[in-house]
Amino acid sequence: MRPFFSLLLAASLLLSPFAEAKSVALNPANLRQMVVYNNIGVLQSLNKVHQAKDRVMIARGNLLPRLDLGASIGALTGGPAFLLSAITVMLPFLVPANWANLHENASLLEAQKVSYRLVQLNQYASAYSLYATVLTDIGIREVVVAQYNDWVKVRNWLRDQQDFVGNVPQIDIDQAEAQVQTAYGDIAKMDELLLTEKSSLKEMLSLGMADTLTLDPQHTPASASESLSLDKVLAKVQAVSPEATQIQHLYKAAQAARWGKVFGFFNSAGMSIVSGGSALDHLGVAGGFSIGFDYVPNIQLANDNINEIRLRFQELKLQQQQLVEATVGSIAEAKRQITAYAEAERLREGVVQSEFVRYTLGLTDLLHVFEAERQVAQARATRLRAEFDLDALRITLHRALLTDQFSSIPGCRIRPEAEEKDRKWLGRLFNPSKYTISIDEACRPADQG
């Protein structure tokens, strides 16, 4: 069974209530593999490649000669001697518009193959960002749990002091208990958030509800281009841009479509063999020509489509320029923020200890201890969010440069066996089941042999 249909079978099993639950350990590498081979959006794009390939085959088939035996069907009742009284051989390969249609569909196939890769890249970028988001929120949950544990310790210490010494006001114990319950509610809120985020991640990976996820806490690696000038980074991005490649194929398709409109007046060519009796004694060659009032507007519309693609290319270059400028600059700022927040966190941890000692000595009230503890938790959470911002920016930069895990996104190339079946057009005509091209044959991931 082909891998694609195996994936469909696996997906159907996941929807079954009897599917066995499994535990999936994720890291950036196997996350990429699962997105590329399991994500429904990627599989849908793969099917579109197959459809584009079929359209190329249709356009190629439209170039082959055809026999028109319609004129002789009526002679069947008159006897076999008049069966071949008239034969028309259509010669579509002489019509320029048919060749333009073939070139248009061939370019659209190449554009669709690039589109398939773009879907893989963008879906993985989204999954990678969600992966980093979940890791960040797991870290923030740990901060909330640590804060909860600290409140519990303070509350228990106050209760012990009240029981053995009796010098702790009840209002302090109540305030400590309120902090404990608030932190407990914050933990439940973080659990709810993580449940939603992991559910979204499982959907992207086509996993079942009963499956569980564990994430390897890895930060996005730095890019070697972070220290380069903006001009050099932009040049690297534009050199590897699949979006630019796709636009080039669309431009070629639009040009072919324009030539199809230009030669649209020449709409048929054929050769007729006619006989007045039992022998074929006359040969004629003719072509069909027709020009309507829509001829010039159709050409103008085709030219407008070409201009639109040119504008799209200019827009892409501006978008890439903005992306590089914002991303590289923001990475430098995010690094500075992380350093500052880490130092603030370290200093505030010392303040908490000092405030608690002062409280035990009666030099301050409990609210100052609570505020110092809150500021430590806030500093830790802020540092974690800054680290996530840096991870997200690096994901964006790696996506634009096709580096890190994005360099292993396979894309698509046509399998040799599919090319072989393409050439067996007579076999596909008389034995279609044998020469049917599966989706996996139509587009093999480029990282497979």
Image: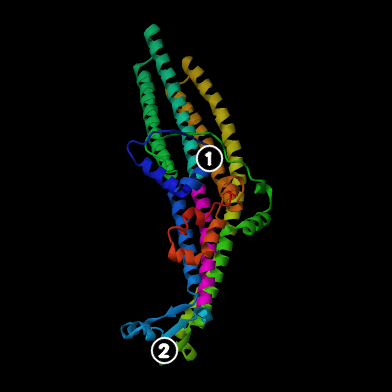
- Helix, strand or loop at label 1? It is helix
Residue at 57% over, 32% down: 344
Magenta segment main secondary structure: helix
Where does residue 140 sit, x and y in percent of width and height? Answer: 47, 33
Residue 289 visible in the current orientation: no
Q: CA distance from mark 1 to mark 2?
A: 73 Å
First in sequence: mark 1 or mark 2?
A: 1
Q: Say if 368 sits above or below 406 in the image.
A: above
Write down the residue under mark 1: 30
- Helix, strand or loop at label 2? It is loop
Residue 401 visible in the current orientation: yes
Q: Amino acid at mark 1?
A: Asn
Q: Is residue 118 magenta?
A: yes
Q: Is residue 210 left or right of residue 345?
A: left
Q: Please state which of residues 139 and 402 is positioned toward the viewer in this rendering.
A: 402
Where does residue 104 sit, x and y in percent of width and height? Answer: 52, 71
Q: Amino acid at mark 2?
A: Ser
Q: Please state which of residues 193 and 356 is positioned toward the viewer in this rendering.
A: 193
Q: Please state which of residues 345 and 311 is positioned toward the viewer in this rendering.
A: 311
Write down the residue under mark 2: 278
Where does residue 301 sit, x and y in percent of width and height? Answer: 47, 78
Give the farthest residue toward the left.
Answer: 77
Q: Is residue 226 left or right of residue 25?
A: right
> Over which residues does the magenta segment extend?
98-125
Q: Is residue 43 magenta?
A: no
Q: Please state which of residues 358 and 140 is positioned toward the viewer in this rendering.
A: 140
Q: Mark 1 and mark 2 in contact? Answer it, CB < 8 Å.
A: no
For the residues carrying marks 1 and 2, which lies nearer the camera in this image? 2
